[in-house]
Image (cartoon, helix red, strand yellow):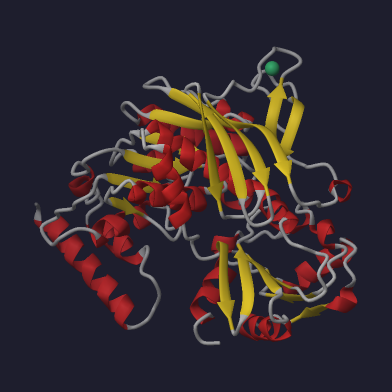
């Protein structure tokens, strides 16, 4: 191993210890950042040592949850995995995860690498390793100010697939932008939903039509036989006959507020899986993770065991209890994801509280105009108290006012710690405090949740 790599590894490991000692955070990116600065090639020292598959998960929404679910399934299958958890999904996060699991002699012991990949950095990462499995969850309008148009994102993912040697590509058939990705170097597997049923009632008439429009490669606007949410569904092109591919892994879903049941057909067999995470958007994450597990030939009962063991990443539908109050934290970052989160909130109970925290730091996206595309109208009849916090609390308050929310029930407390304290205080025992923060607000809550 050359001297530069040795130096990079030592500095990275030392920085991790320092960050921990000084309680500066989780050190999910800094060690990797320093290592890559000293030796840009350090990743290649590790990536050839993996015993089985290198698995990558990319797409605009649901990466962290899908990866978390799949990690849990792989562990249930008694595989040793290296996984960049906590959403550190750029090269620095991947380097940090590898360094963290490496000895000072650059030895690592892993059956699988499971990498959540930021879609914008994926193609660059493929210079250092070639994924065996590439799962693409969806392509939503997301952080446009950072990444540009949707087409650009699809092109970046396509270029990563093209650079990979023999990848099996697992694609969400219900998302037209994803299903049109090509794989000239290996197999292409589709997953998708046939039918979706809800066993709770949210008034769908309160939903205005969804703004996401998708276009066929011929330029025609897609028509839909079924729309599940946003642009996800059974689409077809009236002009050229292009349509949603029939998925090899297809599922019916029964969605409840806090869990979902998936009946999956694959290779002439039928399996039923249960997962304890809320919302249709999470049912897609569960289906994606199961699809990858089935391709890896993991037995269904092991998959179910993995789903049972799954603990959500902080803020990705995480349930916790502080001072005997039930809290559910769900990250929001773009219109479609936020709308799905809002749908999962029970608005009818007066004893429930809602805390919305909107920041506009770089990692949140500087432009908060997306708040106007999310369906906050669904909160119009929220019976409990609403606390609004964060750097852009006043923008959020204006948005709620226009959504028809009764603002006499709302209070603006810009300071996040005070807002969190107050929200917990006013939530009644056995009721639910729903917290919906943007990314950097979520990190702040993570830091302060033990000090309340
Ligand atoms: Zn067409």
Left or right: where 149 falls relative to 205: left
- Residue drawn at x 73%, y 81% is 428
Question: Can residue 175 be seen here?
Answer: yes
- Residue drawn at x 86%, y 77% is 409
- Residue drawn at x 36%, y 51% is 91
Left or right: where 76 falls relative to 423: left
Does 278 sit above or below residue 357?
above
Q: How many marks?
A: 0
Does 268 sit above or below residue 424?
above
Point out the residue furthest to the top here. Answer: 240
- Residue 13 in percent (x, y) is at 22, 68
Quarter of the rendering containing residue 9: bottom left
Which residue is more in the foreground, 452 or 197? 197
Does 292 sit above or below residue 208?
above
Quadrant where the C terminus is found in the figure: bottom right
- Residue 165 in percent (x, y) is at 31, 27
- Residue 438 in percent (x, y) is at 62, 64
Question: Can residue 158 be seen here?
Answer: no
Which residue is more in the foreground, 195 or 238? 195
Q: Quadrant of ligand 1?
A: top right
- Residue 350 in percent (x, y) is at 83, 74
Left or right: where 138 falls relative to 392: left
Left or right: where 225 falls relative to 391: right
């Amino acid at each position: 191993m050359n001297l530069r790599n040795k130096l990079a590894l030592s500095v990275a490991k030392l920085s991790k210890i320092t960050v921990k000692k000084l309680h500066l955070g989780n050190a999910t990116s800094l060690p990797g950042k320093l290592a890559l600065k000293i030796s840009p090639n350090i990743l290649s020292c590790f990536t050839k040592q993996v015993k089985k598959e290198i698995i990558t998960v990319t797409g605009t929404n649901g990466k962290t949850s899908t990866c978390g679910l799949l990690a849990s399934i792989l562990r249930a299958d008694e595989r040793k995995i290296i996984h960049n958890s906590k959403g550190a999904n750029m090269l620095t996060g991947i380097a940090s995860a590898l360094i963290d699991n490496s000895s000072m002699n650059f030895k690592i012991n892993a059956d699988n690498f499971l990498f959540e990949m930021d879609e914008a950095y994926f193609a660059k990462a493929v210079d250092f390793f070639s994924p065996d499995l590439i799962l693409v969850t969806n392509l939503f309008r997301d952080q446009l100010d950072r990444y540009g148009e949707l087409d650009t994102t699809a092109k970046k993912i396509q270029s990563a697939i093209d650079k990979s040697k023999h990848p099996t590509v697992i694609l969400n058939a219900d998302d037209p932008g994803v299903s049109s990705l090509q794989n000239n170097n290996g197999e292409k597997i589709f997953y998708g939903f046939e039918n979706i049923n809800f066993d709770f009632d949210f008034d769908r008439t309160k939903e205005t039509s969804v703004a996401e429009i998708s276009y066929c490669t011929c330029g025609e606007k897609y028509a839909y036989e079924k729309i599940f949410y946003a642009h996800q569904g059974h689409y077809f092109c009236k002009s050229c006959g292009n349509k949603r591919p029939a998925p090899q892994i297809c599922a019916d879903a029964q969605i409840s507020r806090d869990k979902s049941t998936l009946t999956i057909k694959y290779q002439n067999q039928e399996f039923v899986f249960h997962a304890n995470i809320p919302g249709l958007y999470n049912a897609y994450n569960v289906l994606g993770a199961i699809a990858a597990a089935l391709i890896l030939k993991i037995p269904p009962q092991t998959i179910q065991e993995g789903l049972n063991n799954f603990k959500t990443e902080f803020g990705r539908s995480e349930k916790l209890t502080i001072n005997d109050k039930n809290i559910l934290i769900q990250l929001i970052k773009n219109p479609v994801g936020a709308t799905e989160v809002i749908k999962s909130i029970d608005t009818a109970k007066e004893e429930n509280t809602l805390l919305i925290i909107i920041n506009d730091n770089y990692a949140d996206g500087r432009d908060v105009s997306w708040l106007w595309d999310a369906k906050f109208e669904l909160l119009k009849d929220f019976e409990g108290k609403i606390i609004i916090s964060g750097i852009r609390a006043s923008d959020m308050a204006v948005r709620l006012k226009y959504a028809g929310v009764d603002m006499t029930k709302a209070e603006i407390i810009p300071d996040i710690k005070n807002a969190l304290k107050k929200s917990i205080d006013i939530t009644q025992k056995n009721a639910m405090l729903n917290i919906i923060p943007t990314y950097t607000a979520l990190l702040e809550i993570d830091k302060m949740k033990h000090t309340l």
